[in-house]
Image (cartoon, helix red, strand yellow):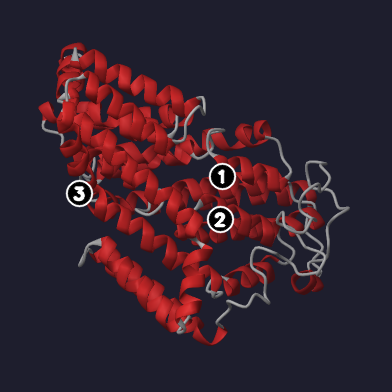
């Protein structure tokens, strides 16, 4: 009975999410409560959920302060010089433009929010693509690959989901996978260079106009390399040069939150945070709590300014933290009712014993199509716990399964179920079909590279 209820609960949760009949927060809360009561949890369901909340509280704190920290860094202009530098360096070379797109997307992806990354990248670079005849599809492909690979950072979502679902620390999942992420980023850069060279051969050298960097140059009537007119890049508020003539709205050079005198302090603070994070000296939530507090105090010394800085990013904070806390209901009921153990035992009898020792690698491969056709919530909270419980009988640790499960993120981010990718193709004025034709096989190669490196370094068991 527990097996049937467990699979029905996963199916109901996935159905509500995939059909958009309920938000993840609602589905994560009501579905487990209903099935937990059917499983006979009774009033004990309260203790199950409370235990889940206690487990996920550090994760919620991590997301809360990580979003604040990187949001502040964008507000105060930490990434502005990088954007302007890229615009100056690309000059008359399509390859440099595409490579600069990849680098910018990687850096801005540190804030963990795909939508913010794509708004900034398209705001900064789309007018240049259109003005100089480089296909906007190249922009969406490179930005999508870069953000998808960076998406495994702990505050990005997938790593937190995997860790939350299995009750483990996000740092234990992420830190050993840093070499895999670096390898994936190298492949992304290689793809960017190749695509840039192809564009260079197709259209020849770009005609560089220095005033473009300072004024934005418009681009409202130019055509991209694929023959598409600029339908979005030249409109204020959608990512292009606005009526003010500024080159990009996403990083308004006159916004009041800029702190140019504190640039080096903010850069040093960010680098120090990332270094200490990788060294794993302190828990990641504690690091971000400290770093965010320092950033707020130094950049916005007045209490009112600090409140406004937090409020600017409140919508992202509320949605993500609410999702994590709601996930405590699902994980608590899964564990408390014994559904996970029952389902794992059933799977153990179904999966051939010869495949058992390879479940981590199998999970990594399956994470590509499964997270493409379903949301991260459905995969990490519905499928991964069951696979992990089964893998445990073969000596595979939950943290190893979590590492394998996050390698499919470069493919996942290209899914039409991901709002950020829909925003990207809309801002760039390209069709999702054109984007998929160029990006999916490349994303699969990046994911497989991350999986292979993880296996080679012993972070993901094989046999």
Judging depth in this view, the residue of 242 and 402 nearest the camera is 242
Is 159 above or below relative to 288?
A: above
**Mark found first going from the N terminus, 3 or 2:** 3
> Which residue lies most toward the bottom here?
261
Residue at mark 1:
420
The image shows residue 452 at horizontal and vertical percentages of: 32, 39
Judging depth in this view, the residue of 134 and 70 nearest the camera is 70
Is 5 above or below relative to 304?
A: above
Residue at the image point whose x is 43% and y is 83% from the top:
298
Dot 2: few (<14), some (14–19), or many (≥20) neighbours within 10 Å? many
Q: Are marks 3 and 1 in contact (CB under 8 Å)?
A: no
Is 380 above or below relative to 350?
A: below
Residue at mark 3:
54
Q: SS for tag 3?
A: helix
Which one is in front in this view, the residue at disc 3 or the one at disc 2? 3
Q: Are marks 2 and 1 in contact (CB under 8 Å)?
A: yes
Image quadrant holding the N terminus, namely: top left
> Which residue lies most toward the right here?
221
The image shows residue 403 at horizontal and vertical percentages of: 28, 42
Residue at the image point whose x is 79% and y is 72% from the top:
215
Residue at the image point whose x is 80% and y is 56% from the top:
234
**In 3D space, how far apart are the residues under numbered discs 3 and 1 (Cα atoms)?**
30 Å
**In 3D space, how far apart are the residues under numbered discs 3 and 2 (Cα atoms)?**
32 Å
Residue 220 seen anywhere in this rendered image of the structure? yes
Residue at mark 2:
117
Q: Are marks 3 and 2 in contact (CB under 8 Å)?
A: no
Is 170 above or below relative to 162?
A: below
Judging depth in this view, the residue of 17 and 188 nearest the camera is 17
Q: SS for tag 2?
A: helix
């Amino acid at each position: 009975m527990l097996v049937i209820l467990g699979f029905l609960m996963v199916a109901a949760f996935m159905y509500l999410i995939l059909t958009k009949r309920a938000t993840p927060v609602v589905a994560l809360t009501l579905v487990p409560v209903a099935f937990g009561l059917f499983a006979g949890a009774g009033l004990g369901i309260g203790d199950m959920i409370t235990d889940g909340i206690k487990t996920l509280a550090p994760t919620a704190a991590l997301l809360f302060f990580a979003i604040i920290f990187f949001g502040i860094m964008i507000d105060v202009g930490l990434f502005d010089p990088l954007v302007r530098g890229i615009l100056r360096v690309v000059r008359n070379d399509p390859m440099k433009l595409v490579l600069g797109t990849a680098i910018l997307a990687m850096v801005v992806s540190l804030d963990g929010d795909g939508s913010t990354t794509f708004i900034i990248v398209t705001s900064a670079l789309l007018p240049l693509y259109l003005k100089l005849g480089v296909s906007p599809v190249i922009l969406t492909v490179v930005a999508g690959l870069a953000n998808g690979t960076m998406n495994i950072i702990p505050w990005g979502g997938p790593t937190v989901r995997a860790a939350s679902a299995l009750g483990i620390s996000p740092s234990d999942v992420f830190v050993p996978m840093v070499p895999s992420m670096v390898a994936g980023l190298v492949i992304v850069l290689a793809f960017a260079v190749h695509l840039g060279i192809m564009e260079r051969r197709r259209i020849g050298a770009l005609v560089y106009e220095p005033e473009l960097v300072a004024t934005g140059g418009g681009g409202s009537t130019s055509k991209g390399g694929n023959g598409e007119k600029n339908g979005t890049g030249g409109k204020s508020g959608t990512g292009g040069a606005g009526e003010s003539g500024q080159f990009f709205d996403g990083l308004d050079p006159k916004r009041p939150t800029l702190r140019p005198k504190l640039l080096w302090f903010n850069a040093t603070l960010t680098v120090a945070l990332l270094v200490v994070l990788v060294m794993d000296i302190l828990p990641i939530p504690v690091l971000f709590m400290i770093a965010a507090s320092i950033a707020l105090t130094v950049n916005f010394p007045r209490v009112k300014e600090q409140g406004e800085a937090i409020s600017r990013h409140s919508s992202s904070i509320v949605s993500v933290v609410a999702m994590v806390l709601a996930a405590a209901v699902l994980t608590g009921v899964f564990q408390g009712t014994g559904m996970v153990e029952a389902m794992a035992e059933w799977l153990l009898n179904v999966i051939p014993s010869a495949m058992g020792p390879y479940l981590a690698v199998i999970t990594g491969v399956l994470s590509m199509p499964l997270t493409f056709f379903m949301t991260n919530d459905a995969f990490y909270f519905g499928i991964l716990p069951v696979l992990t419980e089964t893998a445990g009988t073969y000596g595979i640790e939950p943290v190893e399964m979590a590492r394998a499960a996050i390698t499919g993120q470069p493919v996942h981010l290209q899914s039409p179920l991901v709002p950020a990718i829909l925003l990207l193709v809309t801002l760039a004025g390209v069709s999702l079909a054109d984007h998929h034709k160029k990006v999916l096989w490349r994303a699969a190669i990046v994911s497989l590279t991350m999986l292979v490196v993880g296996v080679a370094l012993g972070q993901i068991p094989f046999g």
